[in-house]
Amino acid sequence: MAWRPMQADDLAAVAVISDAVHGRYTEPVAVYAERLALYPEGCRVLIQDDLAGYLIGHPWHRDSPPALGALLHALPADADSYYLHDIALLPSARGSGAGRAALDLVIAQARTLGLPDITLTAVGGADRFWARHGFAQAGPGYDAECHLMRRVLD
């Protein structure tokens, strides 16, 4: 298994993975395409035999995470946090260390940009995974089943 940079040709598979993993929290393929166009450095896919996961992140404002399904149009010049938009893994990739490896990539990217923390919105019970990796509750998410979480970097 290896994480490689996402390419435009990967977007259809990314949307399929999102649908399978996130259910009602999935987003239109246009969202993923825009993130790739705006910040390709933060977009990766996991290759197992086929595409088995994806990672999307970008600089953003700590206290105003993007709305679910929203296009950004531009990244802020005054970003104060790294927003981990999504790590999604198919069941075949879970438990393999791929999630931890993706988080390491995100931490490295945030540090490269000089950002002090990582913010994310946990859906579908993922808050337990994120808490094990140093994230704490930081506010409400999209609805009562989601959690805005943050990890301050050392």
Image: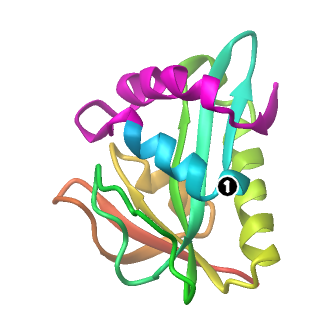
Q: Is residue 154 left or right of residue 148?
A: right
**Direction from residue 90 to residue 44 in the image, left or right:** right
Q: Quadrant of residue 50?
A: top right
* Colour setup of the view: rainbow
Q: Measuring 30% from the left and 55% from the top, which residue is drawn there? A: 70
- Residue furthest to the top: 49
Magenta region: which residues? 1-29
Disc 1 designates what residue?
42
**Quadrant location, the C terminus:** bottom right
- The residue that appears at 68% across and 51% down in the rendered structure is 40
User: Left of 87 or right of it: where is 126?
Assistant: left
Q: Is residue 19 magenta?
A: yes
Q: Regarding mark 1 in the picture, which secondary structure is present there? A: helix
In the image, taking residue 147 as reference, residue 100 lies left or right, namely right
**Residue 88 screen position, x and y as percent:** 53, 37
Above or below — where is 147 with respect to 19?
below
In percent of width and height, residue 55 lies at 61, 44
- Who's the residue at 71% across and 72% down the image? 110
Q: Residues within 10 Å of mark 1 (few under 14, many from 20)?
A: many
Q: Nearer the viewer, residue 100 or 71?
A: 71
Residue 46: quadrant of the picture: top right
